[in-house]
Image: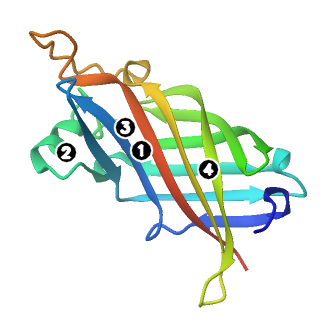
Amino acid sequence: MADLNELNGTYVLDTTHTQIGFVARHAMVTKVRGRFADFEGTASTGENLQDAKINVVIQAASVNSGNADRDAHMNTAEFFDTENHPTITFDSTHIAANGENLAVTGDLTIKGITKSVTVDFEYMGAAQDPFGNERVGLEGSVVVNRKDWNIDFDVPLATGGLLVSEKITLEFEISAIKNA
C-alpha cells in the first residue's frame, strides 16, 4: 500500500464508486440514512500533504433518503432550501496525515453558511484498476449540528427529544482516480 505522503498529483472523485451521505436519528429511536447522487470533487497534492487542496461541490437537490416525500421536504427552506442554495460545498484549509489516517479540515457551506469542520479519514489504500487508472480509497465521517447551518426543522416529541436529531453524522466513502 502506498504511503499517504507518496500520493502526489491531481485526483478526481469517481462518482460511480463514491458515496457522500448522512445519518440522522428519527424519533430518537432509529436512524434514517441519505446520500447525494450528484456531486463532483478534486484533490490536488504537491510534494507533501500540507500542500494539498480538496474541493467538493454537491447538488443539494440530489438528496435521496429512499422516501420521495422526505426528499422533497429536505429540499424546502426547513432543510437545504435548494431553491436559494442549490449547492453544498467543501473546501479544505488544512490536511494532516497520521500514519494511515488523514484529518481534513475545511469550510463546509450549507444554505450559504460556512463553518469549519474536520473529517477524520482512514486511508483504505491505492491500486491500479483493470483500466490502468491509479485509484485511492478513503473512508471518513464527522458529527455536526444541523442547527449550525440554520437547518431548524423541529418537531418536539411527547417523550422528549426531536423528530429529527440535531446531531447529524456525515459519511464519506471515497474512490478517487489520478489524472494522467
Provide the secondary structure element on which disc 3 rests: loop
- What's the residue type where badge 3 is placed? His
> Which of the two discs, 2 and 4, labels the residue nearer the N terminus?
4
Residue that mark 4 sits on: 55
Q: Position of residue 61 (x, y in %)?
A: 29, 48
Q: Position of residue 101 (x, y in %)?
A: 70, 47
Quarter in which the C terminus is drawn:
bottom right
* Mark nearer the viewer, 2 or 3: 2
Residue that mark 2 sits on: 71
118 horizontally vs 21: left or right? right
107 horizontally vs 146: left or right? right
* Mark nearer the viewer, 4 or 3: 4
Q: Do the CB atoms of the residues marked 1 and 4 lie less than 8 Å apart?
A: no
102 horizontally vs 156: left or right? right
- What's the residue type where badge 2 is placed? Asp
> Which of the two discs, 2 and 3, labels the residue nearer the N terminus?
2
Nearer to me, 18 or 30: 30
**Residue drawn at (23%, 48%), measured in percent from left and top?**
65
Residue that mark 1 sits on: 87
